[in-house]
């Protein structure tokens, strides 16, 4: 009987350890969004996208578990899901803001480049000899 209880406890522990942890994913994705904001690039963007996808999957698993759970355990899952959904929304807003910031920086840099080109063109016109003199 003790062996069965020990085996059951061990299986429960393995199940808990192997479960995805949405809060860890949220924390890591938040760090990745900050990294993207500081240094936007394909690699950091891919990490954010991967984190958001993983979070969606983890929330979906928890929602599935929620539908099969009752009582106090269900209340705990309800509370967790509410928190995860709120944080997920915050992450999406932060990510969109970071992407808009990148677009604005790219736009600003493009106009600086155009401005420099026009300035250089103007200098080249001013430096050329005037016809007819």
Image: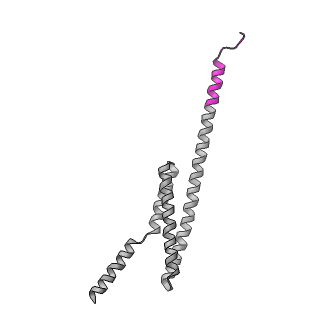
Where is residue 117? Give x, y as percent. 62, 30
Q: Is residue 45 above or below residue 117?
A: below
Q: Which residue is located at x 44 percent, y 69 percent?
A: 21
Q: Does residue 126 show up magenta in the picture?
A: yes
Where is residue 45? Give x, y as percent. 51, 53
Where is residue 60? Give x, y as percent. 52, 71
In which quadrant of the rendered image does the C terminus lie? top right
Q: Which residue is located at x 58 percent, y 49 percent?
A: 101
By secondary structure, the bulk of the magenta-drawn segment is best described as helix
User: What range of the chain is rendered magenta?
Assistant: 117-133
Q: Does residue 44 show up magenta in the picture?
A: no
Q: Spot the residue most to the right.
A: 132
Q: How many marks?
A: 0
Q: Which residue is located at x 72 percent, y 10 percent?
A: 132
Q: Nearer the viewer, residue 53 or 35?
A: 53
Q: Spot the residue most to the bottom.
A: 1
Left or right position of 48 against 6: right
């Amino acid at each position: 009987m003790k062996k069965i209880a020990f085996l059951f406890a061990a299986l429960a522990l393995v199940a808990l350890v192997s479960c995805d942890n949405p809060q860890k994913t949220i924390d890591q994705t938040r760090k990745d969004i900050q990294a993207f904001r500081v240094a936007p690039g394909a690699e950091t963007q891919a990490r954010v996208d991967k984190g958001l996808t993983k979070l969606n999957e983890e929330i979906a698993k928890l929602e599935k578990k929620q539908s099969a759970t009752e009582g106090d355990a269900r209340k705990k899952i309800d509370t967790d899901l509410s928190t995860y959904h709120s944080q997920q929304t915050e992450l999406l807003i932060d990510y969109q803001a970071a992407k808009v910031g990148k677009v604005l920086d790219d736009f600003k840099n493009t106009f600086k480049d155009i401005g420099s080109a026009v300035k250089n063109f103007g200098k080249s016109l001013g430096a050329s000899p005037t016809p007819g003199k």
